[in-house]
Amino acid sequence: MGALSHLRIVEIGSAAATSYCARLFADFGADVQKVEPPEGDPLRRTAPLTPQGHSAWFAFLNFNKSSVVLQQGDAARLRELVTGCDILLDGRGIAAADCPDIDLAAIKRDNPGLIHLDLSWFGDRGPYADFAATDSTIRALTGLVKLVGPEQGPPMHAPDFQTGILGGLWSFIAAASSVLGRMQDGRGRESHLSLFEASIAVTEYIMFEAFQRGDIMRRIGVNRFWPTFPVGIYETKQGWLGVTTVTPAQWRAFCEMLGLDELRDDPTLVMGVDRLRHVAEIEGKILPKLKQRTAQEWFTEGLKRKIPIVPVPEISDLIADEEKLARGAIVPITVGDEAGFSAGTMQRLTATPPLRGGRVPDLGEQQARREAAPRVPGPKPAATDRLPLEGIRVVDFSMGWAGPICTRTLADLGADVIKIEATQYPDWWRGVDRRPAYVLEQMYEKSVRYCIMNRNKRGITLDLTRPKGLALAKRLLADADLVVDNYSVEVLPKLGLGYEVLSKLNPKLVMMSMSAFGAGSVHRDCRAYGSTLEQGSGLPSVVGDPGGPPVMSHTAFGDAVGGLNGAAAVLTALIHAKLTGQGQFIDLAQIECMMPFAAPWIVAHSIDGKPPSKFGNRHPDFVPHGCFRCEGDDNWIVVAVSDDAMWPRLARLLGREDWAADDTLRTAAGRRAIEAEIEAAITAWTSNREADAAMAALQSAGVASGVARLPIDLLDDPQLDARGFIQQVDRAFIGKHPQPSMPFREGDAPFAIRSVPPTLGEHNREILSGMLGLSDAELEELTREGIIGTEMLMEEQLVKEKKRAAG
């Protein structure tokens, strides 16, 4: 029986995010009823299309659901469906899709346990609240467009679909955490999600780095990114290779692999920021070398040398990948009478796995439920303001970005998260510099990136390589609900903290390993960063101009996406554990978590066999659509005519009444014939206007548009300010600094930051004495032996420690 087969979901409106959220529930056995108008959800007509005209995007979002057709007069039937469900996913704030009107307040009185999630592009208030929007205009405004592409412009943005997946993951987190909350207090919860805020998860780290370092980021060329180099995609003898060199050791190994000892030994090229000053010179030497062997051969060589490099697959490579098929990252689906493949569910629960593919419902088609699970009655609703995850204890071994954003999300929702570091190996986002000046000045306490990922947590230090440290960790884990790590797959098992050991100690424990390729992968030992995950996902192969290279984004996209998938996975497993008392192991492969962004092309290509079309900044459905220059230096705006009613309004704004009245231009297909002419007219209009003024004029006319912002601009964004999205936190060593909120909220205000990010070992006494009952004398002994502590060890201290441990 599926982990969520006791839940009944109703999905209304037309929003990719609610559709993806509902599909994640359906994958784990929930009964999902998708409500559509007689002409079907508008997303059924979204490109790319299969040979028989089915939308590949709609197919990815909707397999394993049922479809219910309702007309405007069918309010009684809709009320009956919603009154009998557990969760209402409401996408009417994105597109109403002719949904009958119902009195939700009355339904909630009759069904006080109802969980209701509604979506909008920007939230209920603020200067953007009524803006027309599309996937690409949202990404422009969240800082995800401007830093990608040729240095002179225009910025180059990925095709649509990203906000639907990010919004769907956050929607699932909101709804699933509400299910856990209802199991405790019986109360239904109402959550409101902003897609604009949901997309900031990918860019927030750079936004807050900019707070600390200032305005230093610029677009520096296709597949080139501050602050390090080389990080990008390069041509080989056969295929493309994704390369990431961050540490000096990785750079040295990369140079040695290519036989470029003079680069390796150049003292001016040790750090990535140094190499960025010599891009043309370095590329002049590495590009010819890379063309001497195939991407696969370089990958094999890189594995031996522990360099984060990976072949950049075409969509056809993903579909042919036997490991991805075996793991369920690629699953079979049927749509109409066409059969193909799709990206599956990446939340790899091992005891209650997701369904392996399924059928996309025809309009009005009811699908038989796999198992008719009875609804589980919860407690009588209690008037309470408790957070949904209060009472859940998490032991957090994760570091950097992916694991900590997963556990931060749980902490924001009320879980008690205990972060475990060691004085020998603190969280690497505190910094990996062990020189005396860095350590003595406690620079490891001054990292803003560490702080934004670790609020609302308690922190302790334990040396897990020593028996006493290991024993204390086991005592904590014996009473925990969840343990999370994002180390390489073998680290915790080698320490004696593998799932086989811990499940005997605590049968209800859920354990998640968040490795790059998965515990069972043949590539399990491959070094990877967030950039590596994106390079290997298939997404870069569909970004960019026709005939151009694969293009990746400017941020370590894969980290944030892995973290959100991790949060979704553990919430599913925790619901099952609370119902049954059974924990389980989750084998999350972060590279697979990026594959949904390429899903529409996976579906289309698996059915028609044609290589995916690349559109540059154009769009298969919307004409015009692009990124246009504004007045001033490197200022741009994304403009999208996302429905035909927008076109005459844009034409009049451009002073082209003739275009507005021309019947042949009423449809996108008609406008395609003069697309270049329309783009030239938009450029002539925008290039004489300041970007924000252009957006104001376009939005006043009802045309979807968004200024291409830098991440630093978000710190002063008027919409985020009006919504109180950025919260100010005052913490030792840093002082006041901004923190992002979660993109959904239950009331007017975001979930509060209840406690500042912990300093190293800050809660040693509180947890080891208060929870585990250790005496002061025992704490002193642990400190003396270096098993706990509050100060990071310097390099020479670490060397002594290693010698002592070995001897």
Image (cartoon, grey):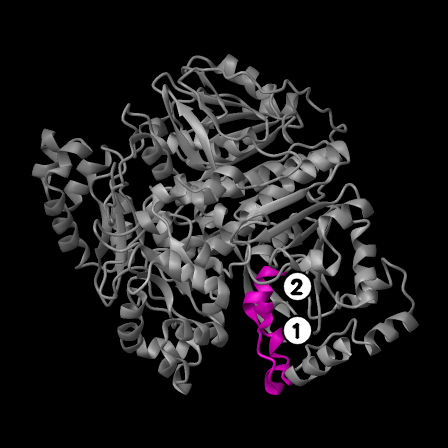
Instruction: Give the residue type that dot 2 points to.
Output: Val
Task: Note whether 216 is above or below 13 in the view shown.
Answer: below
Task: Note whether 658 is above or below 368 in the view shown.
Answer: below
Instruction: Give the residue type that dot 1 points to.
Output: Ala
Going 35% across and 27% down the picture, which residue do you hit? 44
**Residue 84 pos. (x, y %):** 61, 19
**Residue 646 pos. (x, y %):** 23, 37
Tag 2's secondary structure? Answer: loop
Quadrant placement of the N terminus: top right
* Residue 673 visible in this rendered orientation of the protein: yes
From the viewer's perspective, tell me whether residue 357 is left or right of residue 654: right
From the viewer's perspective, tell me whether residue 73 is left or right of residue 4: left
Q: What stretch is highlighted in magenta?
A: 428-454
Going 64% across and 41% down the picture, which residue do you hit? 571
Q: Mark 1 points at which residue?
A: 732
Quadrant placement of the C terminus: bottom right
Between 696 and 284, the residue placed more toward the observer is 284
From the viewer's perspective, tell me whether residue 735 is left or right of residue 607: right
Task: Note whether 97 is above or below 565 in the view shown.
Answer: above
**Residue 574 pos. (x, y %):** 69, 40
- Asked if marks 1 and 2 touch (Cβ < 8 Å), the reply is yes
The stretch drawn in magenta includes residue 778: no
Between 483 and 314, the residue placed more toward the observer is 314
Task: Note whether 572 is above or below 267 in the view shown.
Answer: above
Q: Mark 2 points at which residue?
A: 756
**Residue 429 pos. (x, y %):** 57, 68
Secondary structure character of the magenta stretch overall:
helix
Going 37% across and 38% down the picture, which residue do you hit? 602
Query: Which numbered disc flags the more N-terminal residue, 1 or 2?
Result: 1
Mark seen at residue 593: none
Q: In which quarter of the image is residue 273?
A: bottom left
The stretch drawn in magenta includes residue 443: yes
